[in-house]
Amino acid sequence: MWLLSAMLGMFMLVGCSSETDLVKSEEHHGADQGGRASIEFAPPSPETIPGSQLGEQIRLGYEIVVNTQEYGKPYVGNRLNCSSCHLDGGLNPNAMSFVGLAAVYPEYRARTASMHTLADRINECFERSLNGRALPPDSSKLQAIVAYITWLSQGVPQGAALPWRGLQHIDSRRSLDPANGKKIFANKCVFCHGSDGQGTMAAPPVWGPASYTIAAGMARVTVAAAFIKSNMPRARGWSLSDDDAYDVAAYVNSQPRPDFADKVRDWPQGGKPADSPY
């Protein structure tokens, strides 16, 4: 039964999504400009996991993603799990899904001005979003996460354009209003994230020492706003206006959070996003 509930929840989400809701981050806005054919969102069935050592790797990868605090503890420096952002074990098409992701790597990353493997990208999340440290290249845990994402990507041609990749970019039609965001947070977010933003048993901290660093993608207001719009409050995504989602993101990201020492090395060739907090 492992993974089955997440898979069922994912299929319900797909069924409720409009066909025009293409979830693509601003960073990858031109990903299908080169004539590559798009592909349908079709995660594999859990029954396709092989009954072998590879199958055990895939299952372990899922556990690390969903229960990172337990299975990835030595490499995590805050109270988040991978699935805090990659909802439903990376199966949610509205929340930076892992489905098909293995087919786009290796990929050039402007932030580091270098080619990244899938393992490199995973370690970026551990260092920046989880405020932790990189897993060694020969780590069985790193190999398990790669195996899980690779399994989720089976049948996706190398280099295929993934319409659901990243987040659906939204625009604010007015100046940001963090004060309005604070009011919305108090009305709609505190039940899960706490009045002080430090999290509860239901949801992780969204600021403070146990949250993501200033170098995480979620620390950018445009990214946080897109995530909030499509996913928050949990199970009631798309209920906030674009402007309100931006205001909540502006409020949350105006709060203190961990620094990231290696930020001085980011975007060595230029191109830093306008909403980068550093």
Image: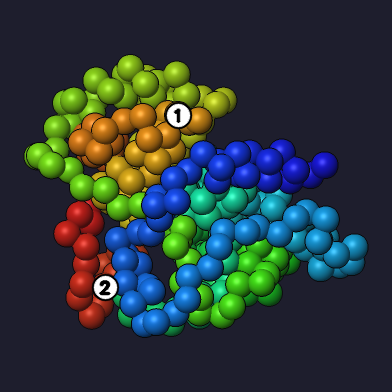
Residue annotated with mark 2: 267
Q: Is residue 262 above or below residue 8?
A: below
Q: Which residue is at the far front?
A: 19
Amino acid residing under circle 2: Trp
Q: Secondary structure at mark 1?
A: loop
Q: In the image, is 267 to the left or to the right of 114?
A: left
Q: Secondary structure at mark 2?
A: loop
Observer-nearest residue: 61 or 159? 159
Q: In the image, is 205 to the left or to the right of 171?
A: right
Which residue: 26% across, 48% down? 170
Q: Which residue is at the far left?
A: 175
Quarter of the picture containing the N terminus is top right
Marks 2 and 1: CB-CB under 8 Å?
A: no
Q: Is residue 147 above or below residue 192?
A: below
Q: In the image, is 79 to the left or to the right of 30?
A: right
Which residue: 25% across, 77% down? 268
| Position in image of residue 142 (x %, y %) | 65, 65
